[in-house]
Amino acid sequence: MTSPSTFNMRQGTVRQPASFAGIGLHTGRHTQVTVMPAPAGQGIRFRRTDKGGKGAELQADWRHCVDFPRCTMMQAPGGAKFQTIEHLMAALFALEIDNATVLMDGQEVPIMDGSAAPLVEAIAAAGRAEQDAPRQFRKIERALTVTDNRISLSVEPADRFIIDYTLELPYWGTQHWAGEVTPESFRRDICYARTYGILSVIWPALILGKLRLIPLVRGASLGNALLMYKDRVLNKGGLKSPDEFLRHRIIDLVGDLALGGGPLIGKVTAFCSNHKHNRALLRAIEAEKTAELRAS
Ligand SMILES: [Zn+2]
């Protein structure tokens, strides 16, 4: 089996442009994003349309990523950035959009409510147009692991896309989710989960109403991020599910893995991995493929 029947077998793009707008979690700046149709074989491309972005254009690819805390960011050779792209990449995965040009009039993809659900809705409303080309699935042929102290992330061959994620959080203990990730299960079980922050550092600033002074989370608010203080969340209405933090990590993982190309077919086992480890795994998969090509 080269690909599971739970995926469309033909490539797809958006039927019409899909737009959404809002502020970025990290920059606090307002940005409009428009996902445009693109030809088969193009993949996902990001383009800056604002003056400051100097028309920069980049293929969605982990090789263009630069290290930045708590989000996934690509940087063009001229310096223009595409920040917090992971939830959008996950939403494109969920709607099986292989080809699109993503126009941004600012640096950071809006955080919306902190989850991938509003992005999924916007793109779903535009619809999917099937294209006359087979999808390129990435089948994992060999087991690989990246570790970083206690953190680990590994892949192994499987005939489906399976994620097994374990998250440990102070005050909250261990949370675990395992299952097959299909476009449908992602939309139903995962995409609603909101991003979160632990308030041991930013709590005093929140009380003082000075959250905007913190450079890493200038746009954060109780409307777009779960804010944890010890064993509580401060958001009205609380959690959407007891393991919402964990499910959000799965959004990030799915979005980051999408920076390696078409849908991945294999089992991914994660223990507390974050964006840095997700990219390290993609690098390891690439190195394995290169080594195999050399050997053959
Ligand atoms: Zn996230």
Image (cartoon, grey):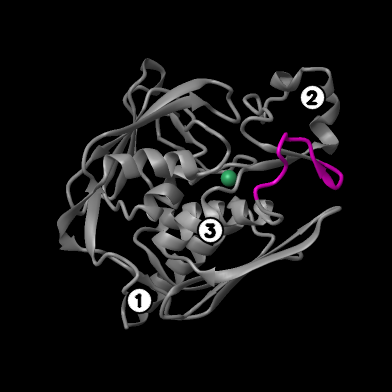
Pointer 3 residue: 189
Q: Nearer the viewer, mark 1 or mark 3?
A: 3
8 on left or right of 162:
left
Q: Amino acid at mark 1?
A: Arg
Mark 1 vs mark 3, CA separation in Å:
41 Å
Mark 3 element type: helix
Q: Nearer the viewer, mark 3 or mark 2?
A: 3
Pointer 2 residue: 206
On the image, the x and y values in percent for residue 160 come to 42, 75
Q: Assign the magenta stretch its main secondary structure.
A: loop
Residue ID at (87%, 44%): 230
User: What residue occupies the far left of the structure in this picture?
Assistant: 132
Nearest the viewer among 239 and 175 is 239
Dot 2: few (<14), some (14–19), or many (≥20) neighbours within 10 Å? some
N-terminal of the pair, mark 3 or mark 2, is 3
Pointer 1 residue: 294
Mark 2 vs mark 1, CA separation in Å:
54 Å
Q: Say which quarter of the image contains residue 64.
A: top left
Q: Which residues are magenta?
A: 229-240
Does the residue tagged 2 have its C-beta within 8 Å of any atom of ligand 1? no
Dot 3: few (<14), some (14–19), or many (≥20) neighbours within 10 Å? few
**Can residue 163 be seen in the rendering of this structure?**
no
Picture disc at residue 22: none
Q: Amino acid at mark 3?
A: Asp
Residue ID at (83%, 43%): 232
Mark 1 element type: helix
Labels 2 & 1 near each other (Cβ < 8 A): no
Q: Amino acid at mark 2?
A: Leu
Does the residue tagged 3 have its C-beta within 8 Å of any atom of ligand 1? no
On the image, the x and y values in percent for residue 167 come to 71, 61
Q: Nearer the viewer, mark 2 or mark 1?
A: 2
Looking at the image, is 199 positioned above or below residue 165? above
